[in-house]
Amino acid sequence: MPARDQAVRARYAPSPTGPQHIGGIRSALFGWLFARRHGGQFILRIEDTDQKRSVRGSVEQIVEAFAWLGLDIDEGPHVGGDYGPYVQSQRLDQYQRWANWLVEQGHAYRCFATPDELAEMRKAGRGYDRRYRDFPADRSAEQAAQGMAHVIRFKMPLAGTTRGKDLIRGEVAFDNAQLQDAVLLKSDGFPTYHLAHIVDDHAMRISHITRAVEWLPSFPLHLHIWEAFGWEKPQFAHLPVLLNPNGKGKLSKRRQQFADAGGKSVPVLVHEFQSAGYLPEAVVNFLTNIGWNFGDDREVFTNAEAIARFALQDVNPANSAYPIAKLDWLNSQWIQRIHANELASRLKPALEAAGYAVDESLLRRVAPTLQVRLKSLRDVAPMAGFFFADWNDFAAPPAEILIQRKMDAAGTRHILQSALPLLAALDDFSPEAQHAAIAAYAASSGLKNGAVFGSLRAAVSGQRVSPPTFDVMAILGKAESLRRIKLAVAALETAIA
């Protein structure tokens, strides 16, 4: 772990190939937590050298995803910085310069193998056979000058072992005989990841790299490129990947949706979490819990609390199944944690999306009644949308909703008729005063509270599930509550008739 006064610079370097996958965000999050833990900088860099896969608007989606999650970026294409440009396609001259430098220094070579030659090698069941590795330098330079298509490949050692240190996995070793001479610069002048990220990480003074364990097989190549340049290497942490909820296979970016055992769609892209009604605090908390443990058996914590304890050495190297069921629980915990007025502001878009015209002062009264009941912000419309419908249009629900379990229409009508004068007589129409009056009636009548309260809830809300009965009536007010109960009595009389 670096000392507090060392300059920690971590980065996230996604390809702009579409919406942000949650696996990439988890890798970024661990780098962000590490940088914040050590008072360092967190950099966003766009790796768009694979032009065929780049998707218009992806950079904006990446920036929006970080903003929504509350992960601030110190340097990047949208905020600038001292080490830009932060988009690789704007740095091509640097990659070409350093690739040619490696050739001049004998660490790399031009490869003129044609697509047909490469296809034959693959058909024969082997990789590139290094046929141009020892090609005479003068002939190589001459053919390049003549415009003959070529790539630049790195000369990997042919024998021995490459060893490197990983902050999560300790020392890792690789048999050099199993490694190939990777392409650094493509024939179109664009670099591969292997060259570009090293040139950029050096130029941007990156001190720590957090990336998925899928890059571990390329680790020896990268170590040798760093050594060939003679640059001080950053420290590496290869993070475990997220697996499908069933634990089988990587949580893919291309297969965007999965279903859990209950058939519920499982979000894997950041915008899916947002549209599904998850709080960003819950999503970040959820991701931090996958592969890292806060300690003290705590699962709910803030970013600030995580930052104070986070260490890359504490990350579990094992890949983890995507524990999506835990997210619903965490989301409900965070809904309860935030201030009711803040919850109201976050619920408003979900209500508007459901077609309701939202009175904000009314919503601020409704929000506290929902905090222990919501698992998702999207639950607000089916649970409490009736508050925001036109009250003049309210109609009594069907008898099957009004009649509680083990009750009939006549008994339910009697409950509602009996409750009307009790409620009408209350000068104090607070939930507490209502509860006292109705609970006393239920006890004196030998009725269960559930039957009485449930009948009233259905009468005033029009639905089986709602916020607490007496909170609903207090918000609606005495006059509106009594009007709705009378409508329900009339509906039951019709049903009985």
Image (tube, helix red, strand yellow):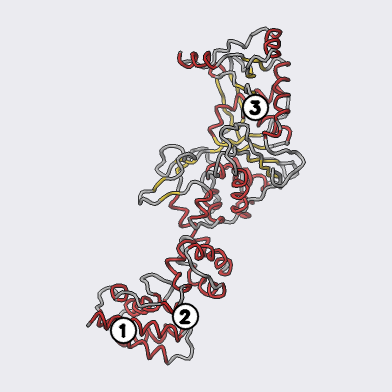
Residue type highlighted by circle 2? Leu
Residue type highlighted by circle 3? Pro
Residue type highlighted by circle 1? Ala
| SS type, badge 2 | helix
| SS type, badge 1 | helix
- In the rendered image, residue 6, in percent from the top left (x then y), is placed at 74, 41
Residue visible at 50% across and 65% down in the picture? 351
| SS type, badge 3 | loop
Up-down: is 471 above or below 43?
Answer: below
**Residue beneath label 3, please?**
191
Up-down: is 464 above or below 440?
Answer: above
Q: Mark 1 or mark 2: which is in front?
A: 1
Q: Nearer the viewer, residue 313 or 134?
A: 134
Whole-number angstrom distance, CA of label 1 to CA of label 2: 20 Å
**Residue beneath label 1, please?**
490
Whole-number angstrom distance, CA of label 2 to CA of label 3: 65 Å
Q: Is residue 184 visible?
A: no
